[in-house]
Amino acid sequence: MTNAPVLLTLDCDMICNDPQALQRALCHLLDPNEEASPKIAFVQFPQRFRGVDKHDIYDNEFSSIFRINPIGLDGLGCTNHVGTGCFFRWRALHGPPSSVPMHTNSNCSERCGKMINSEAILRMVHDVASCDYEHGTKWGLEVRHQTLIVACN
């Protein structure tokens, strides 16, 4: 859906309330002084929960996923992606640019190189970001993503 070099993934009921999150992620992804930086596929921030009962016998905070697993790593020596709060490199998901030339249609090539009407784009962005963008659609009824969470003690 985008050609942006970095993508943020969030669950539909999550928000990112740290205005410096992107800057912090980019520091890891683009650090010129870090040799491993070009090899980093994603930077993930752990979820933090507020107002959970201090005994939390059902592990509502998923502490095993966010506090224990990253320390132990997985079998490949990598951290786990838990599905939300993650900045991905576009290339980590799609690979490097293709060597096959792109097919262009006349409609696209006619618009190529012309200025975009920023007011029209801004209206579209506000429409997509609005609370009622999906109102009246079948999102959640026919289009959905299902997740199974299994807790092991």
Image (cartoon, grey):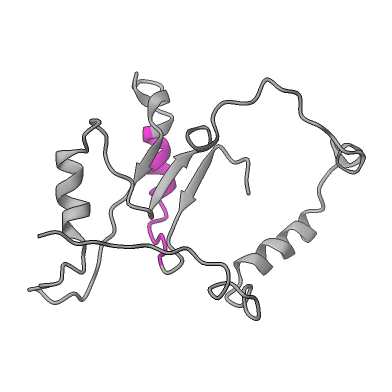
Q: Can you tell which quarter of the image residue 78 is in?
A: top left
Q: Would residue 107 appear left or right of 67 to someone viewing this image?
A: right
Residue 142 place in picture, x, y as percent: 58, 71
Q: Would residue 111 appear left or right of 127 to someone viewing this image?
A: right
Q: Can you tell which quarter of the image residue 105 is in?
A: top right
Q: Would residue 40 appear left or right of 106 to someone viewing this image?
A: left
Residue 43 place in picture, x, y as percent: 36, 41
Asked whether 119 or 128 is in front, the reply is 128
Eyeballing the image, is 125 above or below 99? below
On-image quarter of the C terminus: bottom left
Residue 22 on the magenta span: yes
- Residue at left offset 43%, top offset 29%: 30
Eyeballing the image, is 17 above or below 137? above
Asked whether 35 or 75 is in front, the reply is 75
Q: Would residue 138 appear left or right of 72 to someone viewing this image?
A: right
- Residue at left offset 14%, top offset 49%: 68
How many numbered circles are shown?
A: 0
Residue 49 place in picture, x, y as percent: 25, 67
Which residue appears farthest toward the bottom when viewing the image?
Answer: 136
- Residue at left offset 7%, top offset 73%: 55
Residue 12 on the magenta span: no
Q: Which residues are magenta?
A: 14-28
Eyeballing the image, is 60 above or below 36? below
- Residue at left offset 17%, top offset 51%: 67
Asked whether 62 or 29 is in front, the reply is 62
